Amino acid sequence: MKRLFKTIFGLSIAALLTVFISCPQPIGPGGGTNPHTPSNPGTVPAVPSQTPVEKALAELTVSPLKVFKETTKVNLPTATSVPDVTISWTALPEGYINVESGADLGKILKRETEDTEVTLTATATKDGETKTKTFKITIHPETAEPDAQALAAGLAIQPAVSADFTLPKTVSGYSAAAITWESADDKIIKIEEVSGQKKAIITYDLIDKAVTLTASIHYDDGNPDTPDDAEKTFSVTVKRVEKITEEHPDSISTYEFTGNEYIRIHTDKLTGKIKSGTKYTYTDVQTAADGTKTALFTQTAIYQKTEGEATGKWMTKTETLQEIQQYFNTALSKLAELKKKNLLKLENFQIFPGLGHADTREKMFKNLQWFPDENNPLKTYTFETFDDLEDAQESAELKKMLLIIEKFLNQNLPVQIAMTESMFGAYKCKYEFYKSGSPETINFYTNILYNPAKPWYEQRGVYGFLNSASPVPAGEIMGMDLSVRERDQNQYEASIDISISDGTNPSKNYNGPAPYTSGTTAITATLQESEGSSGPSISVTISGINVDAAGKMTANVQIDTGAPQSLTLKFEGRPLN
């Protein structure tokens, strides 16, 4: 089916159908309700986003907020985790804190005999955008002696972060004021000792997440009437990942996250034009007690570019279904025109949508001969023998082809509609952001979870077995992968990959396809040895297939005439397309 539309039907709908056939099945019923306007298909109202300048200011803080006599400098950052944002400072009243860039930035210049409040203003700039943020600092006189509670009150850390950051271990100027830190949720921010520093390690996510960090200060000021211990809590928001970019030899892949929409785009590096793309909304974002992250992804649009076209377009489910219906209507209309001809020639089929590219009689013959029908009259000919037919004979055979094509179209319209409905569905996925490479980059990965509401053979993933014995006795199965996909409406094909121990290393590997009938508990296949190994094929019978609600499969696997082996296979979902 996939090859048929790719080979024969060259219109944009053909390429769409090629994509649809390999797409995953949905979790939700129907799925894909599209609230989006035709002028901007597949987009949803985004969670309010920040400009780089706004994001930098959201991360910004100064510390300490209370300056006592041993503190000689206030920390005034000139950069954040947001690249290319410049930050400068002013202070009112002037003369108390140095705001000139350099080693003395933030230095306390003078103190009064009473508390002095200074307003610090940070100005952030990038690409012509400028915004400000203010902070209030209290400079205490030389005579003021802080206790633990006063030092805790002066502590400040970043209120919003998008990268790991360092936490203070002491109060500036007061090395005896020891600070310990605790996170209310290690799955959002985990506090670790790294190279003598206290590091707050963030967990990247699809959405913003807030967590409470608690600073505990122990400081003995020598006064028996004041407490030596104090606490201060901070609400810190870990900002969502916004964009990941991957460079490949010929293309650039981008993954954007708006807070409720995931957009995957592959762009040609040379032309800068989109090659393919998919849009999903995401909801029900959860983190389990063990740290596993899940969300419900619903596909809302695909970017489709047909071969030969300079640009493509984003298409929603509604638009895709309309184009499918339009294609089939056009195809049936052209068939009606061909039926009216008294004498049919191969050349006449160029009016049929998708066959116009067949610019020779031989190409047209091969395209028509490919139609998968046992009654296809052209399958009894070679092009040479068909080309030798008299015009009347050629016409008679081609008129039979009209019925074959009409039957094919009528059978496959509901198939394509069903596949499209399935494609624009919802998929509950496990997902992960992780770092790799040098320099480190952020990566994003998804696995579609097992859906107990669907039959085991309609899951998008692989059931795998790995023998834990070492060494694996000769004749036993070392490993096995089993997956099933729908090749046509209610017609399935299993893919089986088996490694068998023969007492040596490496093992013998066999793989191949096998038909599967929906609802049955057995599969029979003849598997060929994998490339790189030699030997005869094997017969495999898988029986007693049973899959529980968690996706754990048990089955008996018999190789040739050997004794059946009872295996337990674990489901592993495929990533989102």
Image (cartoon, rainbow, N blue to C red):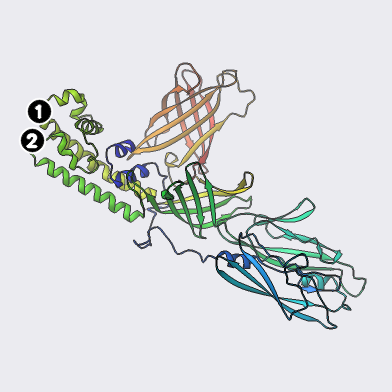
| Outermost residue to the top | 535
Q: Residues within 10 Å of mark 2 (few under 14, many from 20)?
A: some
Given residues 336 and 58, the one toward you in this image is: 58
Q: Say which residue appears at 16% left-offset and 36% top-offset.
A: 347
Given residues 555 and 457, the one toward you in this image is: 457
Q: Say which residue appears at 50% left-offset and 26% top-offset.
A: 498
Percent of width and height locating residue 358: 23, 36
Please tell me in which quadrant of the rendered image residue 100 appears: bottom right
Mark positioned earlier in the residue sequence (2 or 1): 2
Q: Which residue type carries mark 1?
A: Gln
Q: Quadrant of the N terminus?
A: top left
Q: Which residue is mark 2?
A: 343
Given residues 377 and 174, the one toward you in this image is: 174
| Mark identifier at residue 263 | none
Q: Measured along the vertical axis of the image, is residue 114 above or below residue 268?
A: below
Q: Which residue is mark 1?
A: 393
Tell me the element at label 2: loop
Q: Residues within 10 Å of mark 1 (few under 14, many from 20)?
A: some
Is 331 displayed left or right of 446 in the figure? left
Q: Which residue type carries mark 2?
A: Leu
Q: Measured along the vertical axis of the image, is residue 198 above or below residue 501?
A: below
Q: CA distance from mark 2 to mark 1?
A: 10 Å
Counting the numbered discs, the total is 2
Tell me the element at label 1: helix
Percent of width and height locating residue 307: 33, 43
Q: Measured along the vertical axis of the image, is residue 450 above or below residue 61?
A: above
Please tell me in which quadrant of the rendered image residue 240 appears: bottom right
| Outermost residue to the bottom | 114
